[in-house]
Image: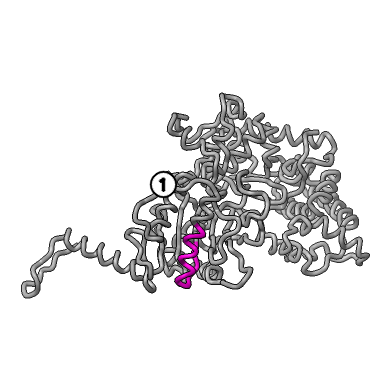
Amino acid sequence: MARSQSGNGPPPYSDAEWEAAVRAAKAEARSTQHGQISVNRRKADPGLRFIGLHGSAPDASASEVRLRANERAEMKAFARDSRPGAPSYLCWHADGPVGKTTLLAGYVRHKPPAGSDILTFFVSASHATDTRAEFENEIAAQIDRFLGTQERSPAPKGTRVWNALFAQAAEKSRKHGRNLLLVVDGLDDDVAWSGDGARRGPAGESGAAKSRARFRGEPEGPDRVVRRSARESIAALLPSLPPPNMRVIVSLRRCAPLPRDVPEKRHPLRQSRHLRTLLPIAGVPRIRQPPPDAMALGEPVAGLLAVADGGLRITDLAELTGLSADHLDRLVRGSTGRALVTEDPVLGTYALADSRLVRAVREDVGEAAVLRYTEELLLWSRRWHAAGWPDGTPPYPLAHQLRLLTGTAERVSYVLDLLRLRRLARTAGPDVPLAQLDAFEEEIGAAADVTSADRLATLTALHGARALLRQAHDTYVPDGAPALYVRLGEAERARPGPLRAHGRRQGRTPGGRGCGAGLRGTALRGTGPPERRRPRAGGGGRAGSGP
């Protein structure tokens, strides 16, 4: 910073003095921003509202805050709602890097809601704040400052003691006409979430020994094992029945099931009415920083997902790799799962989070491994074909194998396999195979290596397959039915098959095959994962064992 050069004014100041003055001014501005705020760096004035800023909370720019104006308005209304029976939890969830942490950091740093005392905690492995012990120490310290406790007491242990502490803090807020707001970001980044330490035993007990996994190149030394051995989760400390004037805002990934120590009954985190899907912002790149390490999933898992380009379930990966489904489930639920997105929440299929990870994994494993994984996927898929596409055929062989087929003849044989089309129509609804036929018709029409005679024969067979599917499955679907089922939490019933069965039971006359598809797609986008690299013309399949 430049020094003052005026000869008539006060004596010049050094760079260090200017910087110290600016820092002090910024601190003072933050302390008085939007009314009187008592920040957690000094003892709280009992008459001022309190905002506890966790040290892991990142900065958020003004432009980032403006892009989330609607979400901020929803949180503001939630925090201020004092009606009897008002919801006590608001849970933002999403299946990719859509800015959950930035949203909550901006919320508490820029224009925090008036009329609320705020406690915050940002779960972060890079800041070593991903354990229940860190949460207990930080939130207990914030509450001590809020209550004006003279001497720091040890962090309380157990949900009953924490419920009493939250009640004590909420009572102070109530006396001053305010609510108590607890904000916890990245709840699923808690090491207890994945259960890694709970069942980690000697090599081979969890199936990890059979994997060629490279856990970020880090040795499993004593420090790492101790930090990852936490069995008790942060989520379990959040109150099941908060005081009437307490509100809780959390964020987490969509694909992460709750830890086992969260009460099964009545806990708000298990109630879908508290969930809000955080959608990506149009035009903003969905890039996670720092980028996740997909190879932490293990080479076989990462390699298969990169080659398959998604569409695989945990049961499929277990069958293909020989790893236990339980071990794979813990990988997905843990921090390594940040390299994944849930491709279809109903079918439970996964994909690598973005195309950069796909390219990185393919380069990392090498061309020979890519060819090996391609052959493994094709052999696995062909076994289901040889069995006649029985009930329980996995989604990938049934709908996505086309991604691996390069020759025109084998692509034609796969797409026009009538048994496959019928099975796909029964499991995923007729819209899916019909969309495949439409896309393949365009492909054949544009193919330069197909003779006119072959093109005519292929298109004739294709039109015949399409007519058979339409004749067998076209049924009237009431307008709005898909969206209504999704909003009622019945996403499975919004899929084409159940809806068309409903139409047949009502005795409706046949309608167009696309009736309701637009509403269903729009509604499911509000509950499923954000759209990935390109539209999929696949799906289908129920969990089942091999043929």
**Label 1 amino acid?**
Pro
Q: Position of residue 70 (x, y in %)?
A: 54, 70
**Colour pattern:** one colour
| Residue 438 counted in the magenta span | no
| Residue 172 counted in the magenta span | yes
Q: Position of residue 243 (x, y in %)?
A: 56, 62
Query: In terms of depth relative to the viewer, which is nearer, 503 or 308?
Result: 503
Q: Main secondary structure of the magenta part?
A: helix
Using the rendered image of the protein, determine whether residue 427 is visible from the camera's viewpoint: yes
Q: Position of residue 476 (x, y in %)?
A: 86, 65
Q: What residue is shown at x 87% (from left), y 61% (from top)?
A: 502
Residue 366, quarter of picture: top right
From the image, which quarter does the N terminus lie in? bottom left
Residue ID for mark 1: 154
From the image, which quarter does the C terminus lie in? top right
Label 1 CA crowd tier, 10 Å (few <14, some 14–19, many 20+):
few
In the image, taking residue 263 as reference, residue 251 lies left or right, namely: left
Magenta stretch bounds? 166-181
Q: What residue is shown at x 67% (from left), y 39% (from top)?
A: 314
Query: In terms of depth relative to the viewer, which is nearer, 277 or 307?
Result: 277
Q: Secondary structure at mark 1?
A: loop
Q: Position of residue 410 (x, y in %)?
A: 75, 40
Residue 374, quarter of picture: top right
Using the rendered image of the protein, determine whether residue 409 is visible from the camera's viewpoint: no
Residue closest to the far left: 7
Query: In terms of depth relative to the viewer, which is nearer, 372 or 425?
Result: 425
